[in-house]
Image (cartoon, helix red, strand yellow):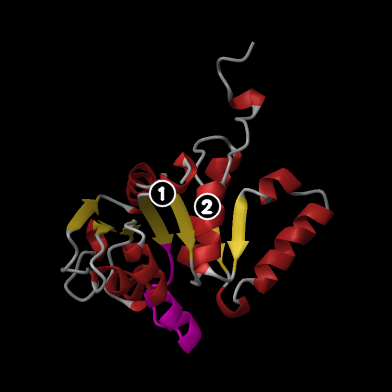
Amino acid sequence: MSEKLNKIHNLAVFCASSDGNDKEIYDSAFEVGKIMAKNDIRLVYGGSKLGLMGQVAKGVMEHGGKATGVIPDFLKTKEVVHTSLDKLITTQDMHERKLTMNELSDAFLTLPGGFGTFEELFEIVTWAQLGLHRKPIGLLNIGGFYDDLIKMLNNMCDKGLLKKENLDILLISDNFEDLLQQMRDFEPQPVPKWMNKNQT
């Protein structure tokens, strides 16, 4: 097995803090956690016991895996925070939460979600585009949930507002094991010359 196939030890997962009403998505979140545990990949996530977030954590822990929650102090209530994680980090605010998750993680995975999930995904993709990190980013398109978003991203390329090489930073699949393989095989682009302070 190549070195590439061993590089993801800690995976940050972005997803909804609500259950939603789609059983396929709900069950798939648990399955993602199960597969992570079986691959000895630690979950790094928002620390909630609710919704898809809670399902991923449940899938991890029920199959012997490890989970780190990162939660802002203002959300740390008994109704929200997962109290059974093996590690819980409290941050001052949402921005510190994202920075901490980035520091702790080797890669990022986005499942279905709402505004918060989109915000986390696009910020981490933008950081990659700017060369601020070189970690793989996966989008799990469960049941075609992200079909319209993918169409929009391609339209942005067609209109010349997004470079194809930047769109290609985002790895996409409807199957988590396939996506995990893409993430393991990911080779980051060179840091843009204008971002490289060592360039003359």
Q: Give the residue type that dot 2 points to.
A: Met
Instruction: Name the residue nearer the viewer: 38 or 114.
Output: 38
Quarter of the rendering occupied by the C terminus: top right
Q: Give the residue type that dot 1 points to.
A: Ile
> Which residue is at a point 33% across and 65% down the rendered structure image?
38
Give the vertical position of 132 relative to 19 (above or below): above
Residues in magenta, as a range: 14-30
- Residue placed farthest to the front in the image? 1
**To which residue does mark 2 refer?**
183
**Element on which disc 2 rests:** helix
| Label 2 to label 1: alpha-carbon separation | 8 Å
* Residue 73 in sight here: yes
| Residue 148 placement (x, y as % from top left) | 69, 72
Picture quadrant of residue 64: bottom left
Left/right placement of residue 164 relative to residue 158 reads left
**Element on which disc 1 rests:** loop
> Which residue is at a point 67% across and 45% down the rendered structure image?
166
Query: Mark 2 Cα within 10 Å, few/some/many (few <14, many 20+)?
Result: many
Left/right placement of residue 23 relative to residue 200 reads left
* Residue 22 in sight here: no
Say whether disc 2 or disc 1 marks the residue closer to the N-terminus.
1
**Magenta includes 167?**
no
Mark drawn on residue 8: 1
**Magenta includes 20?**
yes
Picture quadrant of residue 31: bottom left
> Which residue is at a point 37% across and 44% down the rendered structure image?
99
> Which residue is at a point 60% across and 41% down the rendered structure image?
129
Left/right placement of residue 170 relative to residue 153 reads left
- Residue placed farthest to the top in the image? 200
| Residue 154 placement (x, y as % from top left) | 76, 59
| Residue 74 placement (x, y as % from top left) | 24, 61
